Amino acid sequence: MNAAPLDLTGSDGFGLEHLPYGVFRRHGECGRVGVAVGEHVLDLVALGVEPAGPFAVPRLNEFMALGPCAWAATRATLQALLRSDERRARTRVESSLVPIGEVELLLPFEVADYVDFYSSLDHATNLGRLFRPDAEPLLPNWRHLPVGYHGRAGTVVVSGTPVRRPRGQSKAPDASAPSFGPTRRLDLELELGFVVGVPSELGEPVPVGRALEHVFGVVLVNDWSARDIQAWEYQPLGPFLGKSFATSIGAWVTPLEALLPYRVAAEPQEPAPPAYLQGAEHWVLDIALEVGLRSAGMAEPDVISRTSSRNLYWNVEQQIAHATVNGARLRRGDLLASGTISGPQAGARGSLIELTWNGAEPLALSDGSTRTFLADGDEVILRGRAGPIALGEVRGRIEPALANGRPGAP
Ligand code: CA
């Protein structure tokens, strides 16, 4: 009997060009590595991909440790198997597919260090205008280096993890003293995250032209931010508790190889950056991005922002070259986030502080309510798409703050 080719229709965004890696668990089983194919997870352990060991653990770090040749070989093997109409191959694949509704998706990799950049010109300009209305919006360093800070790896969570409204200190501009309580200005940040698969040596800067050799893949990132806590604490050392309570990432890591065809020439940088930040070509990824917001009463989210990763001024090669130029090393599992991505149009801003202009212009939602910042029960959904590739979405719903510091306390 000559069976029809594997039906990958309904696999919009998750077809053979994509094949993102993640970690899944079926009820009562241990987590292991799988690949998203359409509405299924391809269980790489069941499939018998060699070597099996790196796939039988609940994180991608062991697979990443095999290096770029193994990543490419595995991807080619999977594409060949999924394309094959040979009966044995088909049986092997079909018996390794698990409906995605039957699995729990876990954090896809153990996050080593988390670095958050600030690489969107429009985002940096908008925040400069909001916070320093009487001054030049961009600080003097911004066009000379990719500004960033080291974040908190331990609170990076997978899509779907609820986010509890953090409590902390803040001080309104007209208040005489700071107060303590739940943040009143909880925000989202739409970002693109790059996952480091190949570490670098301590003391040896990574040249800009070799930076991509260290990148395993890409995830969407929501870098949740408590603006009132951030505003009170951030000087002089930078963001701390206003950022470290949670950072959500997609459950599926898109291989860098799948996205390389979606590089486009970037706008020339003015002034030209120093030599260590100049790649052979200045490119950016062309990924359409959107932010959805769904209140507790809404069935479907409203899309509140549409933008593109083309709006990034600094690319990941430059970010890696900069992050290591002092001799700091990359570790396997590092997450390098782009910083909030905003475009020049009002509807292309990647955070609520920009979309509502610091609360002055509330957003109207389709349920009749308005938002300046996030309300309890709100769910934020980030999506991204490049050609036939849909990045794994990032969802997170806001839970009420702890009462008296304890869950469920009155
Ligand atoms: Ca950020």
Image: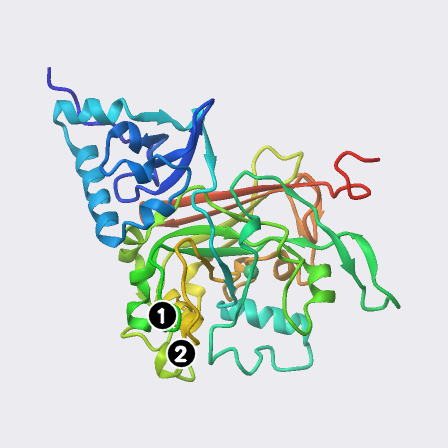
Q: Position of residue 350 (x, y in %)?
A: 55, 58
Residue tagged 1: 266
Query: Contact (CB < 8 A) between labels 2 and 1?
Result: yes
Do we see residue 111 in this rendering?
A: yes
- 330 with respect to 240 (left or right): left
The quadrant in which residue 124 appears is bottom right
| Residue at the extreme top | 1
Whether residue 59 is situated above or below residue 326 in the rendered picture: above
Rendered-image quadrant of the N terminus: top left
How many numbered badges does the structure rendering display?
2
Q: Position of residue 279 (x, y in %)?
A: 31, 74
Q: Which one is in front, 249 or 29?
A: 29
Q: Position of residue 25 (x, y in %)?
A: 44, 29
Q: Quadrant of ligand 1?
A: bottom right
Do we see residue 389 in this rendering?
A: no
| Residue occupying image coordinates x 74% and y 43% | 401
| Residue occupying image coordinates x 44% and y 76% | 326
Residue tagged 2: 269
Q: Which one is in front, 368 or 402?
A: 402
| Residue occupying image coordinates x 23% and y 43% | 74
- 15 with respect to 232 (left or right): left
Whether residue 142 is situated above or below residue 84 in the rendered picture: below
Crowdedness near tag 2: few (<14), some (14–19) or many (≥20) residues, C-alpha within 10 Å: few
Whether residue 370 is situated above or below residue 337 in the rendered picture: above
Cα separation between marks 2 and 1: 8 Å
Which type of secondary structure does the marked residue at label 2 adopt?
Answer: loop
